[in-house]
Amino acid sequence: MRLGVTYGAALALALATIAGCDDNGSNTNDTKTTSPTPNGSDDASTPATPPLDLGTPPADGPTTTTPPDLSRPPYAAVDTAYTAADGLVPPIADVSADEAGNLWAAGREALFLLTPNATRWVAFGPPDGIHVEPFTDVAGNATKTWVTAVAGARPNEVYVGYYGYENGDPFYDPIELKRLGNADRVTYDPATGRITVKRYEFHCEAAASKCWENRSVRRALFVHQGAAAGHVFFGFNHGVSHVYDDVIGDHIHPEIGWLQPDGTVQTHYGEQRGLAITPAGELWTASRYGVGLYRWNPDPYAWVTTKYPHGLFCLLR
């Protein structure tokens, strides 16, 4: 396996609402259908919004920004092939570096670490506190969770995401199934070679609702510079959550409406696999169905209700 840090970008423009969930959230298929309004207009369910202002290009051409410093972690390039003989057991789902130059890798049943100047990876598993654990689902099937994402953070720190149980009911699944997956904050002690694990659980903020839609992490992003430095974002099977200083807000997601032949609208969201941050702290999110831009608020709780300034909803015919 060849590990490296690659920079590339693909832009897609969509008109999307990024919405926090209320107590009536959907189940994990992330599709809901609504009826047309009484006047029968095809797009009557689309909220009235001001035109999208994309700005005016400067007269002297596009502005430029200073590229990141690629000579220091977490941006230093790696061009070495590692195999199981080096302690890195495939399959590997994700790789990220922290600010001390440690490389972290998401193995299916372990979290792997390669410290600076080391030639062999070290594995951390359930005995070390990593939440890879067997369970039986509501249908009686035996299965287990696994590591899906890593985001290198401050020196000797990494955020770890897991695949959990996401095929049931976000409101009425047993609590032990809801708690599977989710995420951890892991810190490494170079002096002892051991890790400490802080557990994160991403249930909906309204405790009375019993809602727990975010079960499995698809992507994790720790911000190293700019307005959101020190904050971390998790893209889940359902929505996107914001964490800072171990404070976990609720979640948001772009909503894309599919207009059906009978005039009803199916609203789709879920599979938040793309996350990117701007220097101003605005968050681009890319789900299976659409792209949205969410404006910055440093408070994870208030961030959920900030909304995108234009509040747009995409209606696809």
Image: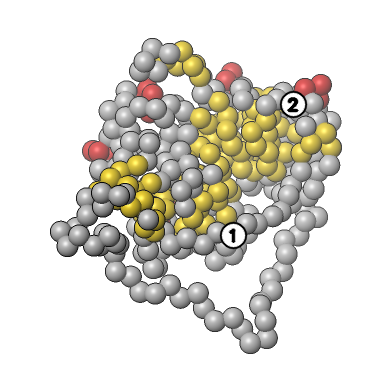
Circle 2 packing at 10 Å, graded few (<14), some (14-19), many (20+), is many
Q: Which residue corresponds to mark 1?
A: 11
Q: Nearer the viewer, residue 282 or 19?
A: 19
Q: Who comes first in sequence, dot 1 or dot 2?
A: 1
Q: Is residue 261 above or below residue 83?
A: below
**Drawn side of residue 124 relative to residue 24, left or right:** right
Alpha-carbon distance for marks 1 and 2? 33 Å
Of 54 and 215, the residue lying toward us: 54
State the image quarter where residue 39 is shown: bottom left
- Count of residue discs: 2
- The crowd level at tag 1 (other Cα within 10 Å; few <14, some 14-19, many 20+) is few
- Nearest the viewer among 178 and 101 is 178
Q: Is residue 313 above or below residue 35?
A: below
Residue at (77, 53) in percent of width and height: 72
Find numbered disc 2 in the image and state the secondary structure of the residue it sits on. Answer: loop
Q: Quadrant of residue 174?
A: top left
Residue at which label 2 appears: 88
Position of the N terminus, as image quadrant, is top right
For marks 1 and 2, give the one nearer the viewer: 1
Residue placed at 63% from the left, 46% from the top?
Answer: 153
From this view, report whether residue 26 is shown above or below residue 75: above
Asked if residue 63 lies left or right of residue 120, the reply is left
Q: Secondary structure at mark 1?
A: loop
The residue at the point 67 percent across, 81 percent down is: 61
Question: Which x, y percent locates residue 8?
Answer: 69, 55
Residue 203: percent from left, percent from top: 36, 38
Residue 317 occupies quadrant: bottom left
Identify which amino acid the numbered label 2 is placed on. Leu
